[in-house]
């Protein structure tokens, strides 16, 4: 069954004295996620933005695997931003930039990101377990920003649970979706068809779907031909 934590650090797991938070899901999914990202990023150079970095553990792992890429973590939650900064200090990696405060529902986030020192173009954007625990405008802002900031051959990579043609891919995902919508009617597992339509409005197209453990998927979007 898919998992989510709205705010890490309030789930009973240990918080390190320096502010580092630990996500249980990271220990289960970082290796299969990286196996796909490593293939997608092979031969690429430049900058990668993680939208919604949470604890910061994923971006640190990815940066350690590809020190030739520049990684930009981001989040909106103050505790998450502090944890990302703490993990960055702990890792001591020179290819991770300062965590950026990004509100994906703000249509001007790309301009603010660039004004804060972010690059004019990104070779990739990665976003895991965000759009189903956020209102739909967050997905709209994510794709709109990707349409603005991705390089001509750039990729938007999403990880999480998704529906296909209005149907859940597993009973556990249906149960998860119901629990999300009961807690907040603006949340919920998103349908790939809806995301494809959103991508098309922003000059993007779904290029690849990868089945992942625990009934999750990776969706890979790129610029339309």
Image (cartoon, rainbow, N blue to C red):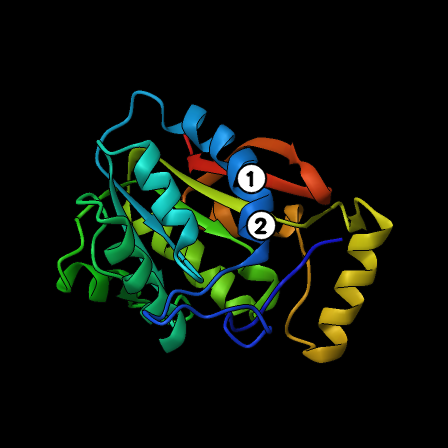
> Is mark 1 in CB contact (under 8 Å) with mark 2?
yes
Give percent across and percent down for residue 165: 76, 45
Question: Image quarter for residue 81?
Answer: bottom left
Question: Please, which residue is most extreme toward the front here?
Answer: 17
Give percent across and percent down for residue 24: 58, 56
Q: Which residue is mark 1?
A: 219
Q: Quick one: 16 or 7, which is closer to the camera?
A: 16
Q: Quadrant of the C terminus?
A: top left
Identify the mark at residue 137; answer none if there is no mark: none
Q: Secondary structure at mark 1?
A: strand
- The answer to whether 16 is drawn above or below residue 60 in the figure is below
Residue at x 24%, y 35% (from the top left corner) = 69
- The answer to whether 210 is drawn above or below residue 19 in the figure is above
Determine the CA span between mark 1 and mark 2: 10 Å
Q: Is residue 211 left or right of residue 157?
A: right
Q: For mark 1, does the 10 Å Cα neighbourhood hold few (<14), some (14 to 19), or many (20 or more) residues?
A: many
Identify the mark at residue 195; answer none if there is no mark: 2
Question: Image quarter for residue 121?
Answer: top left
Res 154 visible: yes
Mark closer to the observer (1, 2): 1
Residue at x 38%, y 65% (from the top left corner) = 20
Q: Quick one: 201 or 41, which is closer to the camera?
A: 41
Query: So how many labels did they put on this image?
Result: 2
Q: For mark 2, does the 10 Å Cα neighbourhood hold few (<14), some (14 to 19), or many (20 or more) residues?
A: some
């Amino acid at each position: 069954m898919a998992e989510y934590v709205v705010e890490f650090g309030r789930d009973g797991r240990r918080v390190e004295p320096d502010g580092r938070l630990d996500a249980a899901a990271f220990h289960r999914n970082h290796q299969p996620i990286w196996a796909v990202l490593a293939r997608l990023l092979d031969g690429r150079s430049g900058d990668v933005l993680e939208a919604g970095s949470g604890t910061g553990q994923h971006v640190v792992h990815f940066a350690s695997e590809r020190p030739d890429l520049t990684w930009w973590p981001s989040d909106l939650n103050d505790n998450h931003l502090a944890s990302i900064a703490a993990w960055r200090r702990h890792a001591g990696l020179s290819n991770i930039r300062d965590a950026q405060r990004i509100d994906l529902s703000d249509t001007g986030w790309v301009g603010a990101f660039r004004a804060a020192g972010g690059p004019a173009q990104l070779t990739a954007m990665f976003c895991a377990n965000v759009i189903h625990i956020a209102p739909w405008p967050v997905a709209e802002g994510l794709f709109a920003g990707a349409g603005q900031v991705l390089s001509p051959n750039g990729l938007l990579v999403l990880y999480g649970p998704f529906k296909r043609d209005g149907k859940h891919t597993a009973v556990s995902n249906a149960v998860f979706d119901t629990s999300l919508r009961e807690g907040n009617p603006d949340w919920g597992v998103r349908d790939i068809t809806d995301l494809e339509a959103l991508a098309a409005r922003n000059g993007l197209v779904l290029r690849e779907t990868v089945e992942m453990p625990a009934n999750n998927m990776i969706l890979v979007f790129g610029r339309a031909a």
